[in-house]
């Protein structure tokens, strides 16, 4: 299997995740709302997945809209499963 990498934004609560989804929906960026990968956290069931090439845009959206997040992670998926690394 080819290694795949992507970014994930986690939130402190479902309320903040839904607000984040609404904000991202208005922006010109590809993203998906996903269940939070268990390799990251169990605090909130929802997260936003994005392409790592958009990390600067993602940070700007978070800051400009004062989104309350838990963290931004890089997830790497390969034959061994997922590996998570906090990047913000």
Image (cartoon, grey):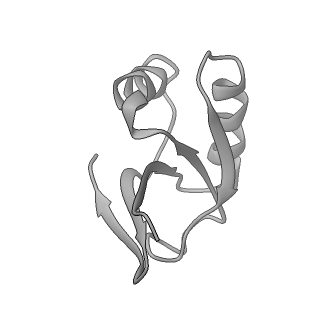
Query: Which residue is nearer to you in this view: 2 or 26?
Result: 2
Q: Residue furthest front?
A: 1
Whether 39 is drawn above or below 26: the answer is below
Question: Residue 15, how many percent across, how many down?
Answer: 70, 48
Q: Residue furthest bottom?
A: 80
Q: Decide if residue 25 is on the left or right side of residue 43.
A: right
Whether 12 is drawn above or below 52: the answer is below
Query: Which residue occupies 44% across, 69% down?
Result: 40
Whether 15 is drawn above or below 13: the answer is above
Tally of numbered discs? 0
- Where residue 53 sits, quadrant-wise, is top left
Query: Which residue is nearer to you in this view: 71 or 8?
Result: 8
Question: Residue 58, how many percent across, how many down?
Answer: 44, 29
Q: Decide if residue 5 is on the left or right side of residue 35.
A: left
Question: Residue 68, how many percent across, how many down?
Answer: 49, 40
Query: Which residue is nearer to you in this view: 60 or 83?
Result: 83
Query: Which residue occupies 34% across, 25% down?
Result: 56
Query: Which residue occupies 56% across, 47% down?
Result: 49
Query: Which residue is nearer to you in this view: 85 or 15?
Result: 85
Query: Which residue occupies 39% across, 39% down?
Result: 52
Question: Residue 51, how many percent across, how many down?
Answer: 48, 39
């Amino acid at each position: 299997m080819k290694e795949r990498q992507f970014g994930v934004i986690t939130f402190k609560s479902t309320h903040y995740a839904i607000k984040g989804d609404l904000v991202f929906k208005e922006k010109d960026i590809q993203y998906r709302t996903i269940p939070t990968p268990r390799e990251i956290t169990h605090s909130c069931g929802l997260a936003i997945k994005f392409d790592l090439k958009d990390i600067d845009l993602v940070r700007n959206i978070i800051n400009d809209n004062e989104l309350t997040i838990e963290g931004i992670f890089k997830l790497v998926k390969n034959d061994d499963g997922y590996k998570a690394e906090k990047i913000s």
